Amino acid sequence: MRIHARRVSDGIVRGKVAKSTAPLSFLGELDANTGKVENPQSELNGRSVTGTVLVFPEARGSTVGPYVLYGAAKRGTAPLAMVVGTADAIVASAAVLANLPCVSGVDVAMLHDGEEVIVNGAEGSIEIPHVEENRVVTSLLQNEKGQVLLLKQPGTVRTYQGKWGGISGLLEDRDPVAQAYEVVEAALGLRREDLSPVGKGAVAYAREGGQGFVIHAYLFRTSRGDLRAAKGYSELAWVDPLQRAQYPAVAGLDRAITLLLA
Amino acid sequence: MQLTKEEESILRGEKGPRLGELMRILVTVGELNDASRLIPIWSAHLSGVSFKTMGLPGTEFLEDAAKEVRFSVPTTVNPAGYDVGGPGLIRADDDFRWKQERLVRSLLAMGAEPSFSCIPYAIERDPPAGVHLAWAESSAVIYVNSVVGAFSNREGAPTALASAVLGKTPDHGLHRPEGRHPDLVVDVGPSPDPIRYTVLGAYLGKKLGSRIPYVRGVAPNIDSLKEMGAAMSAWGSVPMFHVEGVTHEASRQDVRRLEHLSVDARELAEFEHSLGGDESPNLVAIGCPHCTASELNTLAEVLRKRGENAKPKTEVWAFTSRGVIAANPDVVSYLRKAGIKIVQDTCMVVAPLGAEYPVIAVNSAKAAFYASKKSFSGQRVVFGTTEELIRKYV
C-alpha cells in the first residue's frame, strides 16, 4: 500500500523501519559514533539506526540536535531516511544537514518495526510493498445535534464482523465523491438533496496486519435524524463524536472522524 | 514559497554546496510553516556556542562551515562553556577547553561578534522596534518580541546560523502581525509580597506551552520583564507575552473573546517552593540570563546594606557579558572588592559546574530549570531572591 505524506526533504530510498513510539532528541539520545539510540523510553534504546528508515512521532530537546545527525552522516552511522508524525525545524534541519529523504504527517502506527518500506521524499509518500492496499469510500452523516451516524457490520461480512463504522463501499477508479453519495443512497435511500456536504473530505489510512486501507472519507449533514435501519448493516446509532470510543470500530474510523471534524 | 532568482540559484547550489544546504534549511522550515517568502533580517543571534551543549558533531559542523561561508549580517553569539576571553575563573579540563576553543574560532572566523552573551540586546546589538531578527536564545527572543517590539521566531541553532549566513529568515509566526496576538488572558491576583516575576514566568510557561499570554494585574519594571520572560520561555516555549499597560504592543490587542487564566499568590508560593530545596549551597550564582547593569547595581545595593566589610562565606558569582562589564566599570569594581566573582562569556547553565558545585543557589527560575537537569549540570538547587540568598548563605 501507499501512504501520502508531507514532503520535508527530497530523495527516494528503500530500507527497513526502525521505529520509536517515543519522541526522540538527537542531542543526548543518538550517538553519532555508533548510530545507537540511548533513550530508555524508546523501543530503539540500545539499537543502531544506521541504514534504517527511522520512524518516530516527533523530535524533542535541544535545537543543536540536527548537528548530531550531520555528525552521524559524516561517520556513516546515519539512518537512510526519516518518517515523522510531526516535523518541526529540528527535524527539517536534521534532514537537510544529513542529506536524508524525509516525510512527515504520518501516523507512525501505520509502519511496523523491521518491515521494508520505500520512502519517497520527492513526491511525499511511503510505499509498504508487502501490505495489500484496499481502497474504501466512507460516508459519515452528522445530525443537527452534532451526532455522527455509526452503523454496525452484520455477522455475515468477511471482515470486521460486528464492528461499527460509517457507510462504506470499495472505492472504484472513478470520482470518490459520487460514490460517497451512492453508498448513502444504497444503504439509507437518501438522495443528494437530503445531504449537505461539510468540508472537503479526508483521506485516512489504516492497517491490520497485511491488509491496508486507504479510506476516502466524506462528511454530510442531514436533517433526517429519524433513520432507524440501513440496508447491509445490523444496527445503527447516532453517537456523540466524543463518545465514539464506546463503539468497537472498523480500522481507520477514529482517524477519519478526527480528520473530518478538525 | 516564492523565491527570488538569486535565492533559487543559491538553493540549486550554484553559489556552492554549503550555501545551498543552508538555503535548503530555510526553505524547508519555511514551507513547513507555510511561509510565502524569505525576508531580510537586521541581525542574527546564535545558540550552540558552549561545547557542553554542542558536543563534537556540532563543533565539526561549525568547522566545516567556517571553511566555506561567512555571516552576511551582524551576528552575536550565546555564552561559551568557560570564560573564553576572561581570566579563567571557570575550571574546565584541557580537552573541553581545546574543543571549546575550536568551536569559538570557527564562529569568529565566520564573522561572529565576540559577545558570548544571552542578552545581546543590552549592549552589543540593541534592536529597534519593528526590525526582523533570527535569534536563537529563547530568553532573548521573548524579550525582543515582548519588550522591544522587534520580530523573531524562536530559532534553533542551525536555522539561526543559516539566517546569519544568508541574511534572511522565512516570513511566518512572530514575523506576521497575526502571529503576535495573545491566545489567552492571564489575571494575576493581588499578592501580599512584591510579586516574584521569575516565579510567575516559570509558572505560566509550564501552563502555557507555546501560547502567547496577555497578562493583567502586574506592573513589572524592565528587569522583571526580562526575568519573567526568561523563565516563561524555559519552562514553556512561549515566544512572546503582553503585559497590559506595560509592553510595546499590548494596547493594540483585542482580548475580549479570549479565555482567562487566573493566578493567585498562594499558587505561586506553592510553585516557588517546588523550585528548590533547603540546604547550604556551594555556590550562589546570579545572572541567568546575564546580569544587566541595573541587576549588578541591585546586587551591589544588597551587599552595601549588609555592611562594607563582610566578606562572603559562600562563593558568589555574577554572570554577565564582557560588554556590560566594559560599560559599567564602577559597579563591577565595587562588586569585585566586595568579594564577588564577575564572570564573563559563559554562564551557570552552559559551563561544566556540576561536579565541583553540586548544590547551587540561584535567583532565576530559568537557572533552576536547567541546573537540576541531568543533561545539563544535574545539580541540587536552592532558590531565592538575590536578597534572600545573600542574607542566608553569604
Image: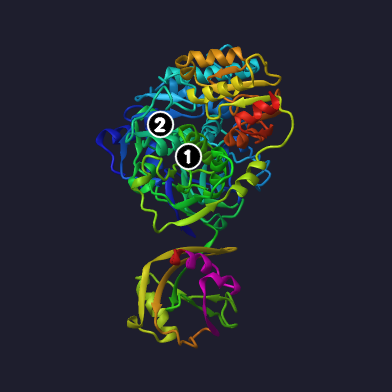
**Picture layout, residue B148 above or below residue A218:** above
Residue range (magenta): A234-258
Category of crowding for the residue at label 1, using alpha-carbon neighbours closer than 10 angstroms: few (below 14), some (14–19), many (at least 20):
many
Residue A19 part of the magenta-drawn span: no
Q: How many marks?
A: 2
Q: Looking at the image, which residue sits at the far left?
A: B5
Residue A237 part of the magenta-drawn span: yes
Looking at this view, is B384 or B125 the one in front? Answer: B384
**Picture layout, residue A107 above or below residue B34:** below
Look at the image and tell me whether residue B17 can be seen: no
**Residue B240 position in % (x across, y down):** 44, 42
Numbered circle sitting on residue A95? 1
Looking at this view, is A188 or B48 the one in front? Answer: B48
The chain letter under disc 1 is: A
**Residue B358 position in % (x across, y down):** 71, 28
The chain letter under disc 2 is: B
In three-dimensional space, the C-alpha distance between marks 2 and 1, rounded to whole angstroms, equals 14 Å
What element does badge 2 sit on?
helix
Which residue is pictured at 39% across the width and 46% down the height? B33
Q: Classify residue B129 by image quadrant.
A: top left
Q: Quadrant of the C terminus of chain B?
A: top right
Category of crowding for the residue at label 2, using alpha-carbon neighbours closer than 10 angstroms: few (below 14), some (14–19), many (at least 20):
many
Pointer 2: what residue? B162
Which residue is pictured at 45% across the width and 87% down the height? A226
Which residue is pictured at 55% across the width and 41% down the height? B195
Q: Name the residue type under label 2.
A: Ala
- Foreground mark, 2 or 1, reads 2
Looking at this view, is B370 or A139 the one in front? Answer: B370
**Residue B136 position in % (x across, y down):** 46, 33
Which residue is pictured at 39% across the width and 76% down the height? A221
Q: Name the residue type under label 1.
A: Ala
What element does badge 1 sit on?
helix
